[in-house]
Amino acid sequence: MKSTGKNIYPWAFGTSFLILTGLIGFLIFNTYKLEDKNYQIGQLNRIQNAYGAVIMDDKIFPGGDAIFQTTLVPCLPKWYEKKINKSADADQYGNHCMNGFLDQMRRQQSLDSIFRRIVHQQGLDTTLVYLFHFDKLEIYNARDRAWTTFYALAADDRAGLISGKLKRGTNNNRVFQLSVSDKNPIPYRFTYSLYVDYENRDWRLVQRMMPVFLLSLACIVVIVLLSYRTYRNWINQRKLSDLKTSFLNHMRHEFNTPLTTILISAHSLIDRETGKDDKEVAQLGRIVERQAKRLKAYFEQVMGSVALQEQEATIVSVSIDRLTQQILKELHLRYRGEIEIQYEPLAADVEMSLDEDYYFSILDNLVSNAIKFNDNSKKTIQFSWEQQGHHYNLKIVDNGVGIAAADQEAIFTAFYRGKLSGNKPGLGLGLYYVKSYLDRLGWTIHVTGGKSGSGTIFYIYMSNVAFNGKR
């Protein structure tokens, strides 16, 4: 692999780790938000129902309506006139009225005792604290036929505090937001909220989510360790792969040199066939030549089997019919006199994505097997095409010894030799190569024929879809 490929791996791991960490963080955050929203929701509902029963005929707390009538209501008409007429002192007058009203509410409120009684009656946690807060005062504007806000305070504004020790009110700990209204002397609407919570709410939520935090952290740690281990193993495998490739190249060179020398020497001995003694030498030379060729063929098969996984496909789009004819012509010249090769061309010109060397090796191994495992004096192999929808099947029929039905599942395994192969020379790698190349091209193969001497039929199922990469 190129150095750039090696450098990409750490970056890919780092990026994936950051994305995964961000995703886990996002899920934890949303889980926290959901827990925060639904935390103690059952207690809040019980408080709301109990409080509603207490103030059913009053405002805010028992005696609250009297404070409304004596403190706030008398100010409303004058405040309304000033506001509508945009008097300069309208806001000052309104603040004075509201401050006096809220001060009176704080002095006379009985909410502390009401809340303690509700907690006791409902069997709630006694560490709960509450906050009653004024939100806004609205007066109906008859001219615009709409409610106009005359006075409003945010939830975190302590000036709106009526009663309670809770420091912070939020949407998640608000029991309710209620409005009390009246038409006399003018239509008005007074809105307030009740908040109930624990002072250490955030820490309680964190404690509840601690298993999620710890499990997520453990998962991240495990992923990091596994990824690191995988990366180290990948580096070691690359080193072994590079070493294996270097070794194979070295062995191929070291073996080919003496084998070639033996073949040349044997051929020289054969050429010296003149006298009686020379004929014997030439005969021995032919034996040496045949065995050296066999040894070289076996060596190339073994080297090819080991190096097969390192080969990279070169995919091109070609006319499958034209390429098949070209390859079979080359094989006809190579195996002239050994086998008759017949071919029925395609009716249409079909473009297909494939590796030409892979395709050549597939056909070459099939023809070689048809010669090797064939006891007939006239050996034949036929190639023809069948079409099924968008797929093309290459049918190969020979008149060899055939393949037993029991061997048809395992015949494509490396070094496997079928029952009908007898004592034929070979390592059992030919069909293994065929299957390996077909797998890389995304094609499949099926074999039929099981009776001795009946020959073998192969079907290669080809797809004309684009090649998807090394498999």
Image (cartoon, helix red, strand yellow):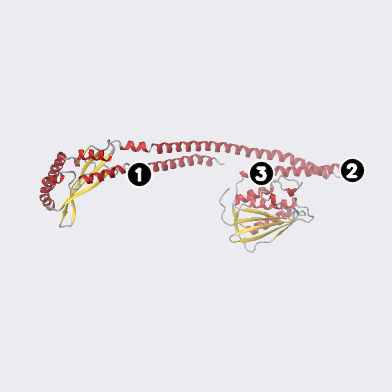
Tally of marks: 3
Q: Position of residue 185 (x, y in %)?
A: 11, 52
Task: Name the image quarter holding residue 25.
Answer: top left
Under mark 2, the amino acid is Lys
Q: Nearer the viewer, residue 140 or 52?
A: 52
Q: Position of residue 228 (x, y in %)?
A: 50, 36
Circle nearer the viewer, 2 or 1: 1
The residue singled out by tag 2 in the image is: 276
What is the C-alpha distance between the residues marked 2 and 1?
A: 102 Å
Q: Residue furthest front?
A: 121
| Residue lying at 60% horizontally and 46% vertically, measured from the top left | 312
In the image, which disc is placed on residue 305? 3
Instruction: Classify residue 148 as left or right of residue 359.
Output: left
In front of the other: 408 or 26: 408
Residue for badge 1? 34
* Image location (x, y in percent) of residue 177: 24, 47
Disc 3 and disc 1: Cα gap in Å? 58 Å
| Identity, as a three-letter code, of the amino acid under mark 3 | Ser
